[in-house]
Amino acid sequence: MDQSLKKILWKQFGASIDMLQNAVKFCPESFWDTERQFGYNAFHCVFFLDYYLTLNPAGFTPPHPFSLSEFEDRLPERIYTKTEVLDYLQFCREKCKNLIANMTDEIYNSNWENESKTMRYNMVEILLYNMRHVQHHAAQLNLLLRENINDAPHWIRHAKDTI
């Protein structure tokens, strides 16, 4: 896969992840676990970030202490702490960066397909789909922050690091 395309993909996907991270960090503890579900929505986004970054999603399991509740159409057993979600997000950031940096032509030309076969994408398309999902939720979380604490983190133009 072309190195310049890898750099472009990472700069933009990394920026989306960084924006999500900033929104999570910016959230006051007093707002994390309220009826507005900031903490749950942050977890939901990170869970699917991880899932969509998994080359072979059959048998996907998130790291401990997270559950598969997102696949079971239910809330998790508890709202994960901000630290747990930030640690999971950092894990996913590295997973994303490594996937893009080490993407071979074989991976580039392969397809990502979920177990139920309801989603099938080329690898670059699932990366773009995933990036849009992250950005969608980062924007939602920033809106919640604006509405509830009248402040939110700034826009990020590109990832804070390169591949």
Image: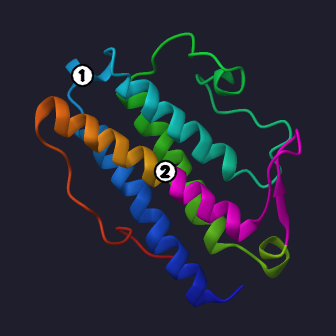
User: For this view, does 41 lie left or right of residue 53?
Assistant: left
Find residue 31 and name its label.
Answer: 1
On the image, the x and y values in percent for residue 107 come to 81, 71
Q: Is residue 30 above or below residue 110?
A: above
**Quadrant of res 38:** top left
Give the residue at x 62% y 45%: 50
Q: Give the residue type at disc 1.
A: Phe
* Marker disc for residue 73: none
Rendered location of residue 162, percent (x, y): 44, 75
Question: Which residue is found at the position 24% from the left and 22% from the top?
Answer: 31
* Of the image marks 1 and 2, the number of the one nearer the N terminus: 1
Rate crowding at label 1 as few (under 14), some (14 to 19) or many (20 or more) other CA atoms within 10 Å: some
Label 1 and label 2: CA atoms lie apart by 20 Å
Q: Does 79 appear above or below 22?
A: above
Relative horizontal placement of residue 124, taking residue 146 as reference (left or right): right
Of residue 29 and residue 125, the one placed in the foreground of this image is 125
Res 69 quadrant in image: top right
Residue at the spot of label 2: 134
Dot 2 crowding, Cα within 10 Å, few <14, some 14–19, many 20+: many
Q: Secondary structure at mark 2?
A: helix
Name which quarter of the figure residue 122 lies in: bottom right
Q: Residue at x 41, y 38 (%)?
A: 86
Which span of residues is magenta-colored?
A: 110-133
Q: Is label 1 in a helix, a strand or a loop?
A: helix
In the image, what residue type sits under mark 2? Val
